[in-house]
Amino acid sequence: MNEENNYLSKEKFDELKTELEHLKTTRRREIAEQLEYARSLGDLSENAEYEEARNLQAATEDRIRVVEEQLSHARIIEHAKGSTVSLGSVVTIQKHDEKEEHVYEIVGSAEANMQERKISHLSPLGAALMDKKRGDVFTFETPKGTQKYKVVAIK
C-alpha cells in the first residue's frame, strides 16, 4: 500500500480494529492448535493437515499486515454536513433528461461498495462530484461515453 492517507469512516476504522484484534488473538491461537495437532500426526513432508495449517497461518499473517497498514495510514472522515460535496457526504443526483434519482455516499477507496451505494472519491463519478454544490450540473466519462448529471441534494 502506498503512503497516502487511507480515508475511512469511523465505523470502518472500528471494524478493522476489531478484525485485527481477532486475528492477532483468537485466530493465531486456533492456527497454533491446528499446527500442533498436525505435527502430532507424524511425517510433516506428506502431511496435508500441516501444509493447510501453514498456508492458513501465512494468509492470516498477510491479512494482519494489510490491516495494520490500512490502520496506520487511516484518516477518519466525518459524515460531512455542508453545502459542497466532500468525503462523507450523502449525495442525491439525477441523470440529465431522467426523473429517477440516485443516492450515493462518498467514501474512501477502501470502503467503496456499489451494493451499499458507497462510491470512492477517486472513482470517475466520485471525483466528478467532489466540491459540487446543490444544483450544479456536471459530467464525467464512462465506458458508454460522457454522462451528464445534476446534484439534487447533499446531506
Image: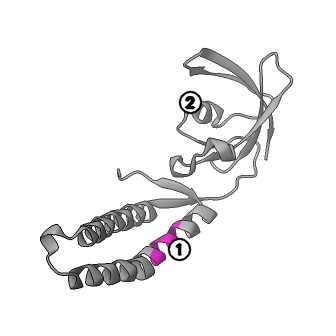
Q: Amino acid at mark 2?
A: Pro
Q: Is residue 112 left or right of residue 85?
A: left
Q: Is residue 26 left or right of residue 93?
A: left
Vertical position of residue 100 compared to residue 57: above or below: above
State which tag comes first along the sequence, 2 or 1: 1
Magenta stretch encompasses residue 74: no
Q: Position of residue 62 (x, y in %)?
A: 32, 63
Is label 1 in a helix, a strand or a loop?
A: helix
Please tell me which residue lies in front, 151 or 112.
Answer: 112
Q: Residue at x 58, y 34 (%)?
A: 127
Please tell me in which quadrant of the rendered image residue 96 appears.
Answer: top right
Q: Residue at x 66, y 18 (%)?
A: 147
Please tell me in which quadrant of the rendered image residue 136 appears.
Answer: top right
Q: Position of residue 53 (x, y in %)?
A: 30, 71
Q: Residue at x 63, y 64 (%)?
A: 11
Q: Which residues are magenta?
A: 16-22
Please tell me in which quadrant of the rendered image residue 23 appears.
Answer: bottom left
Q: Which mark is residue 124?
A: 2
Q: Position of residue 45 (x, y in %)?
A: 13, 69
Magenta stretch encompasses residue 17: yes
State how far apart marks 2 and 1 are (Cα): 31 Å
Q: Is residue 149 left or right of residue 124?
A: right
The residue identified by callout 1 is 18
Q: Nearer the viewer, mark 2 or mark 1?
A: 1
